[in-house]
Image: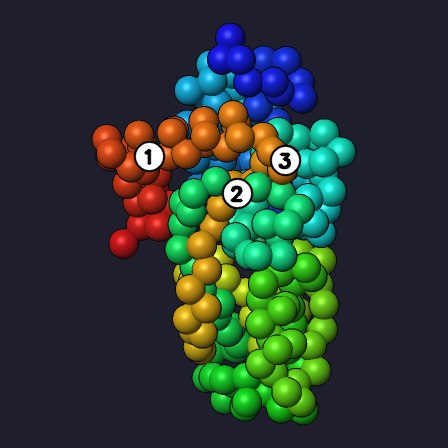
Amino acid sequence: GSGISLVAEGKLTTCTHLPYEPFQFRKDNKVVGFDVDIVDLVAKQLKVTQEIVDTPFEGIQTGEDLNAGKCDLAAAGMTITPVREQNLDFSAPYFDATQALIAKKGSPYTSLAGLKGRKLGVQQGTTGETYAKKNGAGVETVQFEDVALLLTAVKTGQVDAAVNDNGVLFEYVRKNPELAVTAEFDTGEKYGIAVRTGNTALREEIDKAVKAARADGRYEAIYTKWFPA
Ligand code: GLN
């Protein structure tokens, strides 16, 4: 074998939080998406198959799941942050993102300042929640457990707008044209795949797999598959 110790033999077990389309979501009873394809590159390199565990984002981003041995890695459209780096180790960045605002098309909500006294939906435990709380003085934030609940709340008018990652919001408005992305905040985030602190062997395997895929066009092919121009 590869000499990498895995929580379940012959498997690369991934913790993620569904749905987070187009990074990870269910389609025809299968979990698919950009992150799934990226981790498959690692699994292939290790000659094992990927097994995906759907679990709340909170346990992922705090490092709790990885430390409890629930999975080998976490791939969840997760931004590399200094706080998270205290509790888990990240691969090299594999995707760039920024926070963005979504509201009903034609609505006046195009900035956090413009949402003063209004309701702004955020996804619990995310960088979007942190950004909204820090920059949205006078804005009432409402927490949701996942992005599906969050975006449904914008549609139904339970909240006036929501903050989340740009890639996810642009995909949502593509499928739900009654909503629009009304602002992008240029937070300059980078997604990383997380491993247990000190699991350098696996972290290096991830970096090696992604680097090779960037060099030979497979990364590009995965990108265009999930983010068609
Ligand atoms: N990128 C954001 C974060 O890391 C959102 C991740 C997610 O909701 N899956 O907090």
Task: Count neighbours of disc 2 (C-alpha within 10 A) and say few if under 14, some if 14 to 19, many if 20 or more.
Answer: many
Mark 2 / mark 1, whichever is N-terminal? 2
Task: Count neighbours of disc 3 (C-alpha within 10 A) and say few if under 14, some if 14 to 19, many if 20 or more.
Answer: many
Image quadrant holding the C terminus, namely bottom left
x then y, percent, for residue 159: 66, 77
Give, as a three-letter code, the residue at label 3: Arg
Checking the image for residue 211, the label placed there is 1
Give, as a three-letter code, the residue at label 1: Lys
| Callout count | 3
Residue drawn at point x = 67 percent, y = 21 percent: 7
Task: Count neighbours of disc 1 (C-alpha within 10 A) and say few if under 14, some if 14 to 19, many if 20 or more.
Answer: some
Q: Decide which of 159, 208 is in the foreground and name it.
A: 208
Q: Contact, CB < 8 Å: mark 2 with mark 1?
A: no
Q: CA distance from mark 3 to mark 1?
A: 21 Å
Q: Is residue 169 visible?
A: no
Residue drawn at point x = 66 percent, y = 56 percent: 146
Tell me the quadrant of ligand 1. Answer: bottom right
Mark 3 / mark 2, whichever is N-terminal? 2
Residue linked to disc 2: 90
x then y, percent, for residue 209: 38, 29
Q: CA distance from mark 2 to mark 1?
A: 15 Å
Rendered image quadrant of residue 28: top right
Height in image: 148 above or below 212? below
Residue linked to disc 3: 196
Rendered image quadrant of residue 221: top left
Q: Is residue 70 visible?
A: yes
Residue drawn at point x = 63 percent, y = 37 percent: 197
Q: Which mark is nearer the camera, 3 or 1?
A: 3
x then y, percent, for residue 177: 44, 68
Q: Mark 1: which secondary structure?
A: helix
Height in image: 131 above or below 167? below
Give, as a three-letter code, the residue at label 2: Phe
